Image (spheres, rainbow, N blue to C red):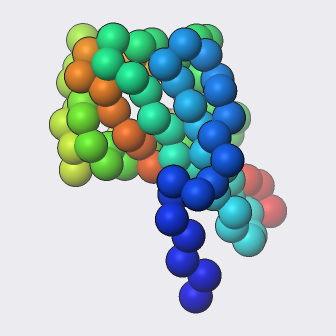
Amino acid sequence: MNPVDVETIDPVFVGPGCVRRDVSVEGPVRAWVIDMAPGSEWPFTDQHDEMGELVYVVSGELIEGETRYKAGTVVRYGPHSSHRPRTQTGVRLFGYNPRPL
């Protein structure tokens, strides 16, 4: 076991109001925590490969198109999908992208 306080992970500025923290994991997965400030939008369209993406809304509210996802929701983006998340209230997400073996 190797617990890590997310707040101690170096933040990566992605765009206005959007910060990513890459979680160190082993194996065929990329894990991260995203914080988006109130009123922010992801600065580009996120494109997925054949493995897609899984996101857990830790706090706040995630908006995709006209759909709102509250804290506690798991959102799965399918293979070759794309999206551009935004938030009005602010949001913290935990997610991962599986990598092909």
Q: Can you say which quadrant of the picture contains the C terminus?
A: bottom right
Query: Is 51 left or right of 88, judged from the image as shown?
Result: right
On screen, 98 above or below 59?
Answer: below
On screen, 69 above or below 22?
Answer: above
Front residue (pair 7, 2):
7
Q: Which quadrant of the view contains residue 39?
A: top left
Q: Which quadrant of the view contains residue 38?
A: top left
Residue 21: where, in percent of width, then height?
Answer: 61, 45
Query: Is residue 50 visible in the rendered structure shown here?
Result: yes
Residue 40: where, in percent of width, then height?
Answer: 41, 13
Residue most extreme to the right: 101
Residue most extreme to the bottom: 1
Query: Is 99 left or right of 15, judged from the image as shown?
Result: right
Query: Is residue 54 visible in the rendered structure shown here?
Result: no
Residue 34: where, in percent of width, then height?
Answer: 50, 38
Front residue (pair 92, 64):
92
Residue 5: where, in percent of width, then height?
Answer: 51, 65
Q: Residue at horizontal 38%, vertical 40%?
A: 92
Query: Is 8 left or right of 92, judged from the image as shown?
Result: right
Report the number of discs: 0
On screen, 3 above or below 99?
Answer: below
Q: Which quadrant of the view contains residue 47?
A: top right
Q: Can you say which quadrant of the picture contains the N terminus?
A: bottom right
Q: Residue at horizontal 39%, vertical 23%?
A: 37
Front residue (pair 40, 8):
8
